[in-house]
Image: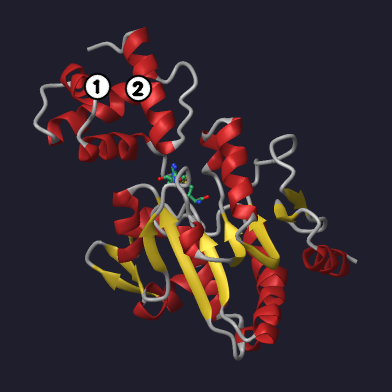
Amino acid sequence: MSVTPEVYAFLSDLLKKNSGLSLGTGKEYLIEGRLPPVATTFGLSGLDALVQRLRGVPDPKLLKAVCDAMTTGETLFFRDGGPFDAFRDRLLPEAAQRARAARRPLRLWVAATSTGQEVYSLLMLVAQAGAVMDGVRLELVATDYCTASLERARQGIYNQFEVQRGLPVQLLVKFFQPVPQGYQVIPALREQPQFSEQNLLRPFTNLGMFDIVFVRNVLIYFDVPDKADVLTRIARQLHPGGVVVLGGTESILGITDALARLDGYPAPVYARTGDPVARAEGKRSAA
Ligand SMILES: C[S@@+](CC[C@H](N)C(=O)[O-])C[C@H]1O[C@@H](n2cnc3c(N)ncnc32)[C@H](O)[C@@H]1O
């Protein structure tokens, strides 16, 4: 089946409403490449039959499988470098200090975990932070919309190609064990994140308040109103001094005024607008 304009419009609308994905124009090839295998899994004859089944009130499992198939899970260890330098050198020490003073856990949320490389990159840095974390317990919440990616993140198994993307060999030796499929993150790290499914379009207040939120390279797929909505709701869940880290190419300029960019970090780091703690730390460290 070729993707007619009517089918394209129908699927675009369905994806936007359910996962936030703003397909835009000219992505027929993505539909043609990714949805026929979903049809096969559900015993349907092809894309036509799949689209028919999605009309009206679709089977929630089929709808989820379609949305999952259309997400892009591209990720790698220590992606972009800068955010991880910022985390190690300033965000983690400053958040640890605040958590210690308030006698509460340091809470970190990775909001589009994909297959886990970002989560484990951060955990390797925490494991090497030494005295920075003295007396502070870390609570790491790792969420994603895509069920299969989350399952892979939980398992923490990466093949040869994946461990060659961004992971220094000394960290591979220290934090991974060889397994038949490649390398698996050691249990001490793997057991730390609380992995759960979370669609960013839906409410997430139940996740609690956070010191640091990594929400990188996911909002680029959303349209402006959805982006603004998600960022505004994340801003409400920041502890005083809390920060949001976005992807290297992302900016919120003209999208929301709930967050303000902090100067002097080697990554796009934002705090809740007017937060005096974050501003003070940003200026002090930048000086
Ligand atoms: C390109 S990956 C980014 C992974 C990682 N944050 C990074 O920067 O390397 C985008 C991730 O966003 C997830 N995603 C897409 N739509 C989502 C939504 N509505 N809610 C939560 N996660 C979503 C996808 O499943 C995918 O794992």
Instruction: Determine whether, in the image, residue 124 is placed left or right of residue 155.
Output: right
Q: Is residue 264 above or below residue 20?
A: below
Secondary structure under tag 2 reads helix
Q: Secondary structure at mark 1?
A: loop
Q: Circle 2 sits on which residue?
A: 11
What number is the disc on residue 165? Answer: none
Residue 42, given in percent of the width and then of the height, sits at 13, 34
What is the quadrant of residue 241 in the picture?
A: bottom right
Judged left or right of residue 268, residue 122 is: left
Please name the residue shown 44% across and 30% down the image: 16
Residue 3 in view here: yes
In terms of sequence position, does the residue under pointer 1 or pointer 2 come before the other?
Answer: 2
| Badge number at residue 55 | 1
Residue 90 found in image quarter: bottom right
Q: Is residue 223 above or below residue 94?
A: above
| Left or right relative to 140: residue 45 | left
Using the image, determine if residue 215 lies above or below residue 4. Answer: below
Residue 247 visible in the shown view:
no
